Image: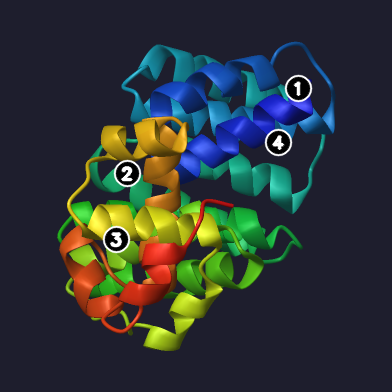
Amino acid sequence: MQIGDRATAILNIGLGHYVEALTAARRAAEGNLGPFTAQALPDLVEAAARCGETRAAAEALNRLQAATAVDGSEWAAGLQVRSLALLAEGRAADPSYAEALERLGTTRLRLELARTRLLYGEWLRREGRRVDAREQLRPAHETFALVGAEAFADRARQELLATGEKVRKRQVDTANQLTSQEEHIARLARDGHTNPEIAAELFISARTVEWHLRKVFTKLGVTNRRSLKEALPDRRQSLLVAQPG
């Protein structure tokens, strides 16, 4: 059960749905399951910090420090300092993020390294250091895209765009990678239907529609609904007959 809760927490963190992530992360980090709990606690720190629940984040960090006190591994130390950076104020976060990258870079936890780069890049952008942010966000985006972590890849891409980076758009042929349901949702969104309207037609939730649209945007290299008409100029007929998968 807790494995599923952690997967839910990570998915919602990638999507930026931090309230949902916090609920799942709390369940995933209950009790003490050794290394599993030690890896789940950083998710709880991140979700709580993003929700403004600083007390809950600090408590999770204390638990993480206690759980890994005698571990001595680079991954444990890396996740600790990354969590510390999330709770730091101002420029105090900088050295912690840098240390987390150094330590996690020596491990096989490539996704945790990419997540750290994403968090660091987001922080750097908020500090106005856009060039430095891009140096972290580019490899983060590449890693997420390579392993198929689409929610995190889209989040990294949006951050890159926010820095002024011109993320290369994929070719129109990428549209062939859309599933039938994604094509159908893309058609409805392009034609001006709202997420609730699409959800009602396809008998799914509005949140699910949002998730599919994020995937569509990532695959097509666009950032909004208006761009769908340009990204799919020659697929109108096929979209009209597409059925939800």
Q: What residue type is labelled 3?
A: Glu
Residue 2's disc is 1
| Looking at the image, residue 244 lies above or below residue 160 | above
Lower position in the chain sequence, tag 3 or tag 2: 2
Q: Which of marks 1 and 2 is in front?
A: 1
SS at mark 1?
A: helix
Along the polypeptide, which appears first: circle 4 or circle 1?
Answer: 1
Q: Distance between the residues labelled 3 and 2?
A: 22 Å
| Res 159 → quadrant | bottom left
Can residue 79 be seen in the rendering of this structure?
yes
- Height in image: 196 above or below 152? above
User: Residue beneath label 4, please?
Assistant: 39
Mark 2 residue type: Ala
In the picture of the structure, the residue carrying the numbered disc 2 is: 92
Q: Where is residue 8 in the image (x, y as percent from the top left)?
A: 61, 32
Q: Distance between the residues labelled 2 and 4?
A: 24 Å
The reply to whether discs 2 and 4 touch (Cβ–Cβ < 8 Å) is no
Spatial separation of the CA atoms under disc 1 and disc 2: 33 Å
Q: Which of the two residues, 127 or 30, is positioned nearer the viewer here?
A: 30
